[in-house]
Image (cartoon, helix red, strand yellow):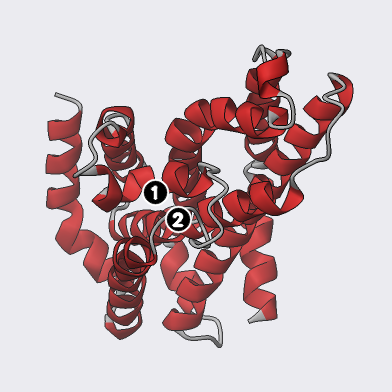
Amino acid sequence: MGALLRVEWFKLWKTNIIPFILLAPAIVFMVAWNTNIDTEELSGSKYLYAAMYANMAYAVMFLPLMTGVLATLICRYEHQSGGWKQLFALPTTRGRVYVAKFTVVSMLTLCMQLLVLLALLLVGYLKQYGEPFPTELLLRGIIGGWVATLPLIALMLWLSTLFQSLAAPFAVNVIFTIPTMLVLNSEKVAPYYPWGQPFLMMYVTGDEVDLFYVPWQQLLTVVGGSFVLFFCNRLYLFAAQGSVEDRILLTSKLDWLIIRMLTY
């Protein structure tokens, strides 16, 4: 497994993924820096308000989109020149390959989240907030946002291994990410919308009961349930299928039809 993880990381490294990772803390830094919170009313909560305004751009749009980018890029080489056949010629199983890809993407997403936390700390230091850094509250939001991306990573990885064209899974991710801001305004729909969970679980409320600022029922059913559905189902199908190249030929017409519909 360790060798597979190194191979998958090397693939992403060759695609120059580091600038995309650094773009996340850059966005948070710029939004938090330009947020006017130098009022006495916000004294003692400046970091929390800076994080709240930054998450409006980061957690709502960039974070869900970035999961799709990472998932598509990690499958890029396999879709070129019969890469799947070459990969499965190695002494390993299909299930391990899929788990390795998911692990690398999820770990990179966690690193991106931790860089966001450092960006908030840097903003407070440079603007001299003059208050303790709420490490526990913000770290709960950072970890919660990462947990909320796991179902999205599993879904995007499912689509990325299913379709030979990388445009199809990315287009699907964009289509469901754009309405997130509107969905979050609905109290009935927002708790069940997977693309809205990163923002909801990064929205710091100071609640000591809920671990990631959402009810336990929502965490277990929406986030946990969608993760089990997307990850375990695709892992089983991916490990049990016969030939990936045969699958690509069988789904090529469906792939072409979806792309035409999305670009029409």
**For residue 124, which quarter of the picture?**
top right
- Secondary structure under tag 2 reads helix
* Camera sees residue 165: no
Name which residue lies at 66% across and 19% down: 41
Q: Where does label 1 land, which residue?
A: 197
Q: Residue at x 68, y 31 (%)?
A: 45
Disc 2 packing (10 Å; few <14; some 14–19; many ≥20): many
* Quadrant where the image shows the C terminus: top left
- Mark 1: give few (<14), some (14-19) or many (20+) Cα within 10 Å: many
Secondary structure beneath label 1: helix
The quadrant in which the N terminus is found is bottom right
Q: Is residue 11 left or right of residue 224?
A: right
- Residue ID for mark 2: 148
Asked if residue 217 shows in the view, the reply is: yes
Label whose residue precedes the other's in the sequence (2 or 1): 2
Return the x and y of residue 251 as percentages of the image width and height.
Answer: 17, 58
Residue at point 75% right, 49% down?
A: 135
- Disc number placed over residue 217 in the picture, else none: none
Q: Position of residue 205 (x, y in %)?
A: 53, 44
Task: Give whichever of 21, 149 is nearer the camera.
Answer: 149
Task: Name the residue: 33% across, 34% down.
Answer: 174
Pointer 2 with pointer 1, Cβ within 8 A: yes
Q: Is residue 30 above or below residue 82?
A: above
Mark 2: amino acid: Ala
> How many marks are shown on the rendered structure?
2
Q: How far, Cα to Cα, is label 2 from label 1? A: 6 Å
Q: Is residue 70 left or right of residue 218?
A: right
How far across and how far down the image is residue 71, in percent? 46, 52
Q: Position of residue 61 (x, y in %)?
A: 44, 32
Q: Amino acid at mark 1?
A: Gln
Q: Is residue 244 left or right of residue 201?
A: left
Asked if residue 242 lies left or right of residue 204, the reply is left
